[in-house]
C-alpha cells in the first residue's frame, strides 16, 4: 500500500483498531476525536482454503511422484501449484478484512491480519469525503486493492457501504467499511476546522 505523503509503510506497533464503528471519547465539541471501523469478508476464507490445497498438491507431487514423466514436467507442475497456492493465500488473507482509523490528522487503512498492505492519507491532502451506500467488487474489477484510471484507488473487501475521499491532486480513494457515515462526519468536521483556522489566521 502507499502512504500518500511518506512512501510505503510496513507493519508498525501502532494502536490496534477497535471494533467496527467505535469512536473515542469526544472532545469539547461533542464529536469523536478518533474513529475506528472494520469490514470483513468471510467468503474469502474459502479461496484461502483453495490456495492451501494448491500448495498441498504441489508438495504431494514433489514427494510422492514416480518421476516417470520426466524431471522438467514434474518441476513445472510442482512450481506452478505452489506459486498459485501462495498467490491465492496472500491475495485472500491480505484482504479478508480491512481496519480503518480516522483521527483529526490522518486516515489510515490496514489490510489483513498483519496490516499490510497499508495506506495513510493526511487529511491535509483531502478536500472532501462522501458516503458510498453500495460499493461492489464489480465496480472495481475485483476484490482487494484496486486502481482504475477513471475512478481512482479503492480497497474493496466486501459489497456494501463505504466512503470516498477526494484528494487535492484530483485522485479519489474508496474503502469499504462498516459505519462509514460516522467516518465521513469526522473527516468533514476536521476539514471544516482546518478551513476555519486558515480563515482566522
Image (cartoon, rainbow, N blue to C red):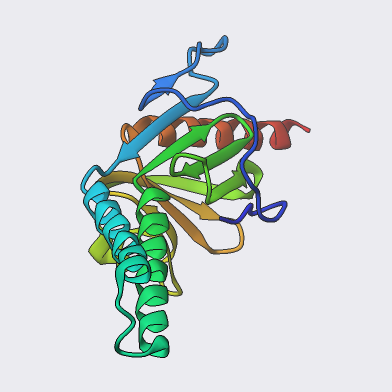
Q: Name the residue rendered at 26%, 52% in the picture.
A: 49
Task: Locate the N terminus and report the quarter of the image it occupies.
Answer: bottom right
Q: Position of residue 177 (x, y in %)?
A: 35, 40
Q: Name the residue rendered at 46%, 37% in the picture.
A: 100
Q: How many marks?
A: 0
Q: Position of residue 15 (x, y in %)?
A: 58, 25
Up/down of 124 relative to 174, above or below: above
Q: Position of residue 200 (x, y in %)?
A: 73, 31
> Can the viewer see residue 89?
yes
Up/down of 194 relative to 132, above or below: above
Q: Is residue 191 left or right of residue 98?
A: right
Q: Name the residue rendered at 45%, 39% in the picture.
A: 113
Up/down of 2 relative to 27, above or below: below
Q: Nearer the viewer, residue 146 or 165?
A: 146
Task: Locate the C terminus and report the quarter of the image it occupies.
Answer: top right
Up/down of 146 relative to 104, above or below: below
Q: Name the residue rendered at 60%, 29% in the picture.
A: 104
> Can the viewer see residue 134?
no
Q: Position of residue 74 (x, y in %)?
A: 36, 82
Q: Nearer the viewer, residue 50 or 75?
A: 75
Amino acid at each position: 500500500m502507499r502512504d500518500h505523503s511518506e512512501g510505503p509503510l510496513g507493519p508498525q506497533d501502532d494502536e490496534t483498531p477497535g471494533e467496527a464503528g467505535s469512536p473515542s471519547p469526544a472532545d469539547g465539541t461533542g464529536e469523536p476525536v478518533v474513529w475506528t471501523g472494520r469490514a470483513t469478508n468471510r467468503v474469502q476464507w474459502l479461496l484461502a482454503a483453495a490456495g492451501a490445497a494448491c500448495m498441498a498438491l504441489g508438495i504431494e507431487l514433489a514427494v510422492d511422484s514416480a518421476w516417470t514423466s520426466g524431471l522438467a514436467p514434474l518441476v513445472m507442475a510442482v512450481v506452478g501449484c505452489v506459486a498459485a497456492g501462495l498467490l491465492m493465500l496472500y491475495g485472500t488473507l491480505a484482504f479478508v478484512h480491512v481496519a480503518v482509523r480516522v483521527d483529526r490528522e490522518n486516515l489510515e487503512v490496514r489490510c489483513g491480519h498483519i496490516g499490510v498492505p497499508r495506506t495513510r492519507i493526511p487529511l491535509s491532502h483531502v478536500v472532501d469525503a462522501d458516503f458510498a451506500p453500495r460499493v461492489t467488487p464489480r465496480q472495481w474489477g475485483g476484490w482487494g486493492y484496486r486502481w482504475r484510471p477513471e475512478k481512482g484507488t479503492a480497497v474493496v473487501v466486501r459489497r456494501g457501504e463505504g466512503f470516498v475521499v477526494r484528494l487535492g491532486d484530483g485522485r479519489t480513494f474508496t474503502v469499504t467499511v462498516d459505519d462509514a457515515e460516522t467516518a465521513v462526519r469526522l473527516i468533514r468536521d476536521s476539514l471544516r476546522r482546518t478551513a476555519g483556522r486558515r480563515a482566522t489566521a
